Image (spheres, grey):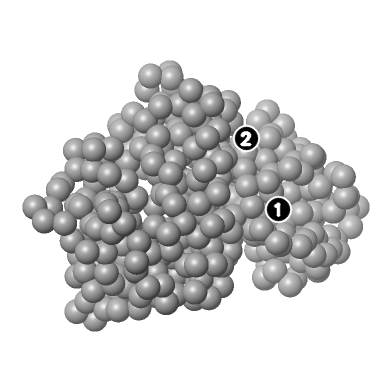
Amino acid sequence: MNQKITYQAARAVAATIEDHFARHLAAAQLRGETALAPHPQAQAIEAIVDAAFWASLLREEGISPKISLAYLPPRQAEQPMLFEQRLPLTPDILTKLAPAVERPGIHLGVWSEDGTLYIWGTTRKIPSICFVLEVVEPGLLVIKHRRIARYGKFANVAVLKGEQVKVVDGNSNSTTDSSDLLTSMLGFTTPAPSSRDHAANVLIQLAVSMRNHGRGGSLLIVPAGSTAWQHSIIHPIPYAVAPAFNGLADLLNQSTQEIGSTQWQSRVQRTVDAISGLTAVDGATIISDRYELLAFGAKIGRPEGNVPVAQILISEPIVGDAAAVVHPAQLGGTRHLSAAQFAHDQHDALALVASQDGRFTVFSWSAAQEVVSAHRIDTLLL
């Protein structure tokens, strides 16, 4: 592959990305998984990232391109639309094609032959652990892969913004005292299905939907059947839900045959968007860890006798990140402060906070370090 690489971040990250896919594909094969995507080599990764980056800086009729590229041969795509002639993978071609493929779920198929990368057409369905590169905005690229579960949000592998590279740390879920829900959320890059896979996927979808409505919001996740969380809420709750709304919980409890179907995915996404829309209302939305909707517009208050939260441990699930102890006011305004206080007082709950600027933070109590942990997960949600 003789394409000249001029975007240096592409070369810097290529070997790491190749290794990520090699490990995950090998692990999936050992488990007996089939219909897996091909292993992308570093040279192909470099060239795809380079072309996509320069395309992101161009404009077509004054509009910046949004493109998703999937690396696979046409024979591995389901019902692909094939071009009569192969197109070269160049920034100009990508920019020209962008208006036709910018809607979610459409990928431009890219493959290589005799050392040359080419665009062969489009597809909506790709195999598990398929290399995907998404152009989000000028200079912002996200490398991701399709999970074994084959529904919900793809798992992010790396985010490139200009010369800044953030590689998602697949081992960041190793905190021994994390709740199962938080551990599965932070371990979202792990492609192996598990009993927590559906919950982790839906929780990520909720976070993405909260972030996308752009108004900011808070979501509290409390233990099902417990009323302890009510001590941290100011009463009366203006929009309490009685009985609890079980729409999302019922979908997650459906049979194995139904879960993952196209119809099921569509129903889940509509329900997720409806619940996340409630977080745009002033105050916090409250659901149980079984995904029962309990209330929205709730005001968080500190229980009588409890001390104000004085510090938090902030971290981001990216390679090379070092956790830091800060005052909660350094993360944001009232929404972040109240969420940190809720996690401080309710040790078995989670508090998710979306900022209007796109930042997203998950607050939880760390029993091992006796401090509130704040996990910045923007990198997982792009």
Figure quadrant of the N terminus? bottom left
Amino acid at pointer 2: Asp
Residue type at mark 1 is Phe
Q: CA distance from mark 2 to mark 1?
A: 15 Å
Residue 257 vertical position relative to residue 213 in the rendered view, above or below:
above
* Residue depicted at x 77% and y 61%: 323
Q: Position of residue 266 (x, y in %)?
A: 33, 38
Q: Which x, y percent locates residue 273? A: 41, 48
Point out which mark residue 289 bears.
2
Q: Does residue 298 lie above or below 38 as drawn? A: below
Mark 1 — residue? Answer: 363
Which numbered disc, 2 or 1, marks the residue that appears first in the sequence?
2
Identify the residue at image location x=16%, y=56%: 86
Does residue 204 appear in this view?
A: no
Q: Are marks 2 and 1 in contact (CB under 8 Å)?
A: no
Disc 1 element: strand
Nearest to the observer: residue 173 or residue 162: 162
In the image, what residue occupies the spot 88% across and 50% down?
A: 369
Vertical position of residue 42 compared to residue 27: above or below:
below
Which element is circle 2 on? loop
